[in-house]
Image (tube, rainbow, N blue to C red):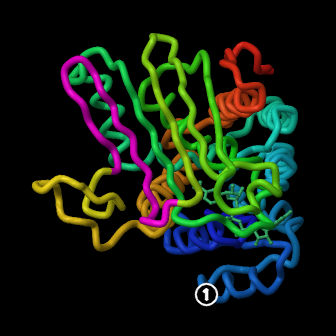
Amino acid sequence: MRIGLIGTGRIGTFHADVLSRHREVGSLVVADIDSTRVAEVADRTGSTAAPSVDEVFTWGVDAVVIASATSSHADLISRAARAGLPAFCEKPIALDLAGTLGALREVESAGTVLQLGFMRRFDAGYASARELVRSGRLGRLHTVRAITSDPAPPPAAYLPLSGGLYRDCLVHDFDILRWVTGREVVEVYATGSDAGPGMFREAGDIDTAAAVLTLDDGTLATATATRCNGAGYDVRMELAGELDQFAVGLDDRTPITSTEPKGPPPCDNPWPGFLERFAPAYEAELDAFLQVVNGELDNPCDGREALHALRIAEACELSRREHRPVALTEIPAG
Ligand SMILES: NC(=O)c1ccc[n+]([C@@H]2O[C@H](COP(=O)([O-])OP(=O)(O)OC[C@H]3O[C@@H](n4cnc5c(N)ncnc54)[C@H](O)[C@@H]3O)[C@@H](O)[C@H]2O)c1
């Protein structure tokens, strides 16, 4: 099939590599507003550089992969829907509810496919955790602890465009919490700290966040994130039930050192970042998308899932600002 890829930055370059090697992709058209970058990626992957994004919609592609900057997602999703094309889009659809809902309405009225890039759903550890919860081996699940720690802050210029730590980073934890447990978040109580590098304060953002989330069956979850985890990239989830407990993301590359005399040896090869830690998951989500396009698989992460995760992030921002618990019913759903 012929695939159009829009955006050839950090994640788009990774997707270009995966798509150009994929057995189902006969031809790949790449586009970016940065003509130098798109030419380099086209050259390296043997794909065709489109002169502009418009050609992606006029050159007869079978599907579109959107990996451009967040501010362009809603418009590109809508264009794909109006062209009748299935689309895969990196999270988020938009940084606000209005933009997210507008794009979803376009997709739903066109009846096209929109798959969202919540790649943790394709990670082996999270997939096992989901199975374990359903198998009953934990007994009643009572506590979930989710962690996302970036090794270093992004460039200062990124912060005003990011939507803040909850929408940009913890949104992955909110999605995977729903997916693993099969439950909905009903209330959040969140706080954040800007005590780290000054650029966070200047952008009105936080460098570290913590949230307590109550699920609809009474399970309690915590989600923490930081942009300043010098030990390395650390993404984990612990699930504790009445019968047993399990951990996702705990292996010999987890950047944490035990203080116990008989603890595991210190990690000497920590995950440097998301592209390394989740490489197999990014590959698997695109493989799934191509199967969806071929009609061989149901959409594993419909666009509506992004709305659910964004509403939890919105509730956390409101909770942090107003220093109070926020019920999800306070956040518009449509
Ligand atoms: N799922 C994940 O784990 C994950 C990881 C990283 C990034 N992302 C998401 O992917 C998107 C891209 O992030 P990135 O880190 O690759 O950013 P980046 O800045 O490295 O790359 C973005 C690219 O988009 C291009 N671009 C901007 N506006 C465009 C437009 N209107 N049309 C075409 N190209 C345009 C830019 O020139 C740039 O090359 C963001 O929405 C981000 O949230 C998701």
Query: Relative to the observer, which residue lies in front, 25 or 123?
Result: 123
Residue 300 in view (yes/no) = no
> The N terminus appears in which quarter of the rendering?
bottom right
Residue 66: give x, y in percent of width and height: 72, 57
Residue beneath disc 1: 44
102 to the left or right of 192: right
92 to the left or right of 151: right
The image quadrant where one finds ligand 1 is bottom right
Quarter occupied by residue 262: bottom left
- Please provide the residue range marked out in magenta: 229-249
Query: Relative to the observer, which residue lies in front, 170 or 260?
Result: 260
> The C terminus appears in which quarter of the rendering?
top right
Residue 241: give x, y in percent of width and height: 28, 22
Query: Relative to the observer, which residue lies in front, 191 or 307?
Result: 191
Residue under the point 45% across and 39% down? 146
Within-10-Å neighbours for mark 1: few <14, some 14–19, many 20+: few
Residue under the point 51% across and 50% down? 119
Position of residue 302 relative to residue 262, above or below, is above
Give the structural element (helix, strand or loop) at label 1: helix
Q: Is residue 236 magenta?
A: yes
